[in-house]
Image (tube, rainbow, N blue to C red):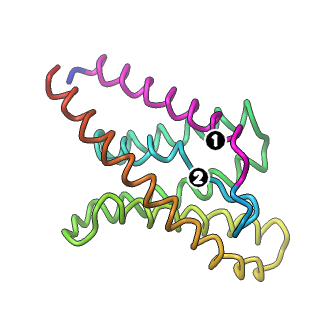
Amino acid sequence: MNKTSKMVLLAIMLSFSLVLYYIENMLPPINLIAPGAKLGLSNIISLTCLYVFGFKEAFVILFMRIFLSSTFYGGISTFMYSISGGILSIIAMGILKKLDLKSVSMIGISVVGALFFNIGQLLVASFMISNTKIFYYLPYMSFISIGTGIFIGITSQFLTEHLKKIIKKN
């Protein structure tokens, strides 16, 4: 794939990520178990980019999505929570992918990413309220993360397989 095609495809992936973020914001939150919990639909694109393009490109797409979505739909607190969770998540997923463990699938890597996203958010929250007891909330958030991580992993796996076929044809 030449540089121009790659740049165009990455721009499309960023656009899809922003659209998924916007759609998710229109959905009601998953308040049954953990208040404020969301599906993390835009993480489909982050995980797909990690597998199709690599860590550096996935990191850039993640950062740009968080910056733009926080600018248009959130604020500084949205940015702080999202960037801390996003960076921890993409680093954890990148390390786990690089280890190339045969026993860990894309779905498993997605679940790990979801868990680390929550840890990043709780780190910011604990800093903002100056109280580490907020980490008692982690088991509840983790319960939701496992389900959403599986969903994101399955969706990303499907998207990655088809995107690689398209790239291979061109």
Residue appearing at x 44%, y 67% in the figure: 112
Residue, x 82% and y 65% (percent of image)?
Answer: 128
Residue type of the residue flagged with mark 1: Glu
- Taking the view exactly as shown, the residue that stands out farthest to the front is 32
SS of the residue under disc 1: helix
Quadrant position of the N terminus in the picture: top left
Asked whether residue 10 is drawn in magenta, I would say yes
Q: Position of residue 132 (x, y in %)?
A: 76, 80
**Secondary structure at numbered mark 2:** loop
Residue type marked 2 = Leu
Q: What percent of the width, then of the height, locates residue 51?
A: 30, 47
Between 77 and 158, which is closer to the camera in this rendering?
Answer: 158
The residue that mark 1 highlights is: 24
Quadrant assignment, res 109: bottom left
**Above or below for 27 versus 39:** above
Give whichever of 107, 95 is nearer the camera. 107
Disc 1 vs disc 2: Cβ atoms closer than 8 Å? yes
Q: Quadrant of residue 125?
A: bottom right
Is residue 133 a member of the stretch shown in magenta? no
Q: CA distance from mark 1 to mark 2?
A: 7 Å
Magenta-highlighted stretch: main secondary structure? helix
Label 1 or label 2, whichever comes before in sequence order? 1
Q: Is residue 38 above or below residue 10?
A: below
Task: Name the residue: 73% across, 33% down.
Answer: 71
Residue 34: name its quadrant: bottom right
Where does residue 114 sit, x and y in percent of width and height?
A: 51, 62
Q: Which residues are magenta?
A: 3-29
- Image quarter (top left, top right, bottom left or bottom right) of the C terminus: top left
Say how many tags the image has.
2
Task: State the residue position of label 2.
Answer: 39
Q: Which residue is at 51% across, 26% downward? A: 15
Q: Residues within 10 Å of mark 1 (few under 14, many from 20)?
A: some
